[in-house]
Amino acid sequence: MTSRFFRRAISWADYRAAIDLVPPPGVDAPEAEYNIPPGTHVPILRRAPEGEYAPRHAIQIAPAYWGLVPVWWKQPLSDKKFASFNARAEGVESSNVFSGAFRQNRCLVPASGFYVWSDGLPFAFAPAAGGWMCFAGLWSRAMIDGSEFDTFAIITCEPNLGVAGLANSMPVILAPKDYTRWLDTRERDPQALLKPCPSDALRAWPANPAVGNVRNQGEALLGE
């Protein structure tokens, strides 16, 4: 289960080196966050729907709430009792909660790493080569209390050998060459992308135990 991740500062130039992003005019790139839990708003990358700052179907960055609310949900958010911040790759195509977004609204979740817990202790995983990465995600726009509400989920898969000793799942980490393929809803076999990344693509280390208790106390939470 992916329940927390972190994102160092990523510049607009860094984003655009990886994907053809249209940044919002006059807005700085999102600040670093070192302890992102479900139930918070974070930036996602997606094909722009109608009425956004970017032309329709261009790749934009937008804030979304981590915990997908399907389009058919019409009740107050406080009445939602099912967890939907992760979507298991196995069965996502037939899930009542996630299947619509899987077909129509796929997104990328920029990150610098993620946390897992083993015997109550947190460990951080990050790209072995440094830099940042993108998790495969799904997003949805629901109408909550008369207002549009954008939400997302991270897709998880079986762990690779490096993660398996600590957790029973991990986020799907896409290769940069597959970013636009994942966003393309005409892609006939997106399920083929939902697999663990190679073990040697990640490095791991014990993180600061405070990760599980605080929202954000800066880079010291990484414990490097």
Image (tube, rainbow, N blue to C red):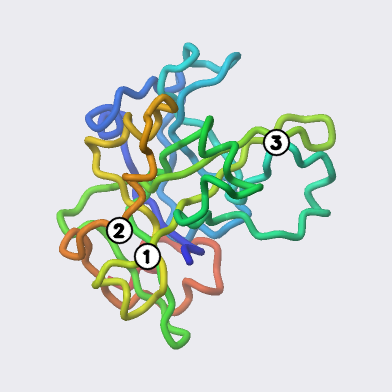
Q: Residues within 10 Å of mark 2 (few under 14, many from 20)?
A: some
Q: Would you place residue 5 above or below residue 194 in this image?
A: below
Mark seen at residue 196? 2
User: What residue do we see at 41% from left, 67% from top?
Assistant: 169
| In the displayed structure image, the side of residue 136 where residue 69 appears, left or right | right
Please determine whether, in this image, residue 131 is positioned above or below residue 54. below
- Residue 158, which numbered label? 1
**Amino acid under label 1?**
Glu
User: Is residue 26 toward the left or the right of residue 161 in the image?
Assistant: right
> Relative to the observer, which residue lies in front, 94 or 39?
94
Q: Residues within 10 Å of mark 3 (few under 14, many from 20)?
A: some
In this view, the residue farthest toward the bottom is: 119
How far separated are the C-alphas under marks 1 and 3? Answer: 27 Å
Indicate the secondary structure of the residue bearing disc 2: loop
Judging from the image, what secondary structure is the residue with disc 1 in? loop
Residue 62 to residue 224: above or below: above
Task: Give the residue displayed 20% in from the left and 59% down from the top.
Answer: 198
